[in-house]
Image (cartoon, grey):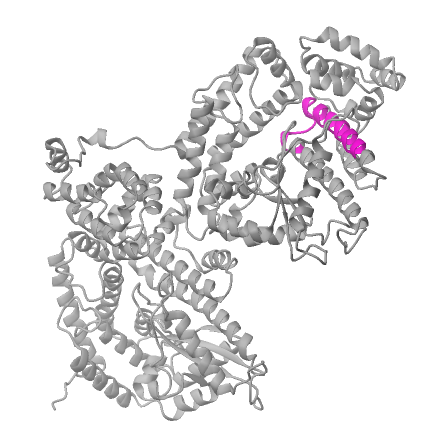
Amino acid sequence: MTGRPEGAALKDRIILVPPLGPDVAIAGSLLDDCLGGPGGEALAALFATAPIARDLVLAVASNSAHLREAALRDGERLHRVLSSDPAALVDGLIASLSDPVADEPALRRRLRRVKAEAALAIALADIAGLWDVMEVTGALTRLADASLSAAIRFLLLEADAAGKVSLPDRSDPERGSGWIVLAMGKQGAFELNYSSDIDLIVFFDPTVVPVADKDDLTTLFVRLTRRLVAILQERTADGYVFRTDLRLRPDAGATPVAMSTTAALIYYESAGQNWERAAMIKARPAAGDIAAGERFLADLRPYVWRKYLDYAAIRDIHSIKRQIHAHKGHGEIAVAGHNVKLGRGGIREIEFFVQTQQLIAGGRNLDLRGRQTLAMLDALVAQGWLDEPARDLLADAYRFLRRVEHRVQMLNDEQTHTLPDDAEGLARVAHLMGYADSEAFATMLTEWLTAVSDQYSELFEEEADLSSQHGNMVFTGNDIDPGTLDTFTRLGFARPEDAIRIVASWHFGRYPAMRSSRARELLTEITPRLIVAFSETEAPDAALIAFDHFLARLPAGVQLFSLLSSNQSLVTLLAMVMGNSPYLAETVARRPHVVDALLEPQFFGNLPGRAELTRRLDAFFGEARGYEDVLDRARIFAQEQKFLIGVRVITGTAAARQLGQSFSRLADLLLERVLSATAAELEHQHGSIPGGRVALVAMGKLGSEELTAASDLDLILLYDHDRDAVQSDGRRPISPNQYYARLTQRLVTAITAPTAEGTLYDVDFRLRPSGNAGPLATRIDAFERYQREEAWTWEHMALTRARVVASTGGFGEEVERVIVETLSRQRDPLKILGDAADMRARLEQEKGSTDIWNLKRVPGGLVDLEFIAQTLRLVNDWREPAVRLRNTEAILLSAATHGLLSPAHRDVLLPAIRLFGDLTQAQRLTLPVKASVSEAPRGVHDVLCRVASAPSLAQLEAELRERQAAVRDAFVEIVGPVVRRTE
């Protein structure tokens, strides 16, 4: 480094001077001519004080015909460039484009002269080592944006003067014009290369365009757009500004060069291609009506960023890359004649990797929606999709290859990415890169291309077919292939012939998911991986049968099969789910998109806390388009997160003990969002109640944060409002009682109604005051009075688990106060215990079970433990605040710690609640609610035994009988005998 500060003239900051090139004699002669012409005297004086500047100019001019012409055609211009700070010069040139012009010829001259001078300054700052490659691309992009704006402003003012439009502000003609110019590709990402075309898509928003007669807007904007292109790209004596390409617009062969946003949205939503989705990642309103452009892109977000991970799209986009390789012959790494953009190991492989990862996860993660390649490599690391060494390699390679690309284009100002195939041409590129000889440059280029190719293959290319590693896997014909039978036998299938017939049946298209040839093709591709993955489970035959049942219910297969084809680790996980959890397998069959959750890089990390879940929820709900979409997104989010949590336990990467809190935390957040959305919908129709506030109270397992995958939600809605409020203030006013009853009804519907995405939760409001006989929503003073004067012991026992999960206006604190005051009153212990024993007897008589696996209702099961904890709290809450807890285990532990539970009872109850709780979570994750454990697949038994740390199912069942008997004995000793009534 020279040590010169930024802001100094280019001549004083030169770091690198390339070797002289083949045209040194020509360059020297033209430089002498330049010194003898206008501005030559000042230029000679500059060279005298900074001879390194002359060396730089001569070296550049001797290697590049284009830069030779640009530098030596105008001595005054060259002097300005060398004697100025490049950044300040380029900024000033760009600013000059906003000055008014008299007519179109004047505009054309200014645009071309500004472009020529700015391009020369940028090239010299680049070659001399003053600017890194992203400063170069950023400056070129800003120049392109400003050129577009200058032409658009001129055309709009001209149209306004002719009466074709009525601009709202002639001092800022673009604003409010409705003319949208999207920069695509590298311009959209501020990554424009040195001789790049600019790819534009032009739209107009008919609702914004300031004209009275909107019948023929297409003709108007087609004419304006054609003139815009002509102004920019037609060659004159001053050259051209930017070559312009409009072919990225929707259905370019059949649509006008400017189309309405209405037509564009219809096209993208009904016929848009996956490559167009990828292209839209970098789309940016670069000129014209920026606000209208941003609104259009906002409307387009659901098309670009899908709610589900989209591996079918990724395969489609990747096939384009393979087609490019096949068509261009760029399958091998080379130097001479190699395409540094499209060839093997080139720029496009880095961009493809980044864009495809964005398409995979950007629908769920807003941090992955950026336009710039290097910034998105950083974001992929931050979000766990890429490791730092891979990022560093790809980023350094990207910078190097972009510099090479610029040097190739500087030779003749051509939009090319292909290195010369002759020794002299390669030497010119090598010199402009700062290499003394072509061999050193070729060695470095080959190393970078190879590194990118290797990294790309590791990250993105298809894996080898597993069938060849494990033997025959042939499923055609009527007879079973002997080699395939041998393969299935060696892989551990107990009934290999049946297994082979199942697999063979998939290819006949009998299931809806396999009716398309594309689906069968993909399934054929992944079958060997599936078979091997099933063979590695505890029960290969059961896993295969479960997967077959899953396929039978799958409505379509291309999306899921594409996803599995791209993710070997996902195949393994899915096989484990199929073998170990019929419940989760059924979930996948009904909602295949839940598998998306397994692809999150954070899957094997800690279970997400409230802050992380909130962040994900904010991102996912942030793009909801209306109330119905909120409800659908709530269901999608719940299904994915519950599935993710469940698989973590099935795979042994999370403990069953963590699940109650994880499921409850998820429900809390979703209820909060749904209540807010439902309240907003009601307010839109009926207004609000003056001073109105609500609190949603969770009871039961949600209240005590012991929720399982299959739990209903027990809820109560409480409200309050100003004393003198008699009706709501909306266009359809209703009384407060009606208002909050209607809010509760709508909330229940919002949570329970089946939408296209299924249901969210089953809910139960029967724990409200007076049960089903009482109003759906209860005012806080009535609730408080009821709890003080009318509630039964069992209702106060239920209240020990009450917890506010959502509220407005600070009302939750008031509700919590009422609950605490209700429970902290001194009670008659004998009455509490007698009522609890009597209620337990009633429950046992009406809904009891002798099945030891009915962990809730069996004598000595979870109900006994919950009753013990709840009675301990009711009896002691007034004198020992330490038991003022909701969770069953927490109450028992605190009671034991504070002498309210004997050591003997503690040693029985605490291990029991932990075991029963863990097994309940595992059961709900592996089996439907009423399924028999004894008849479950062996994989389920393995999960249960692992959760209980038991060596076998038989020993686990023996332990359950022993602990249930001990818990029942403790119940009788603490609460009282369970005496069944006789009729």
Image location of residue 451, percent across then percent down: 46, 25
Q: Quadrant of residue 412?
A: top right
In-image side of 237 versus 733 (left or right):
right
In-image side of 426 versus 110 (left or right):
left
Q: Residue at x 25, y 70 (%)?
A: 906
Residue 982 against residue 638 in the figure, above or below: below
Image location of residue 170, percent across then percent down: 80, 51
Can the viewer see residue 450?
yes
Q: Number of callouts in the render?
A: 0
Q: Which residues are magenta?
A: 108-135
In-image side of 615 versus 888 (left or right):
right
Image location of residue 104, percent across then percent down: 80, 37
Q: Is residue 755 magenta?
A: no
Image location of residue 48, percent across then percent down: 85, 15
Can the viewer see residue 810?
no
Residue 437 against residue 941 in the figure, above or below: above
Residue 754 against residue 728 in the figure, above or below: above
Q: Nearer the viewer, residue 263 or 97?
A: 263
Q: Quadrant of the N terminus?
A: top right
- Residue most extreme to the top: 25
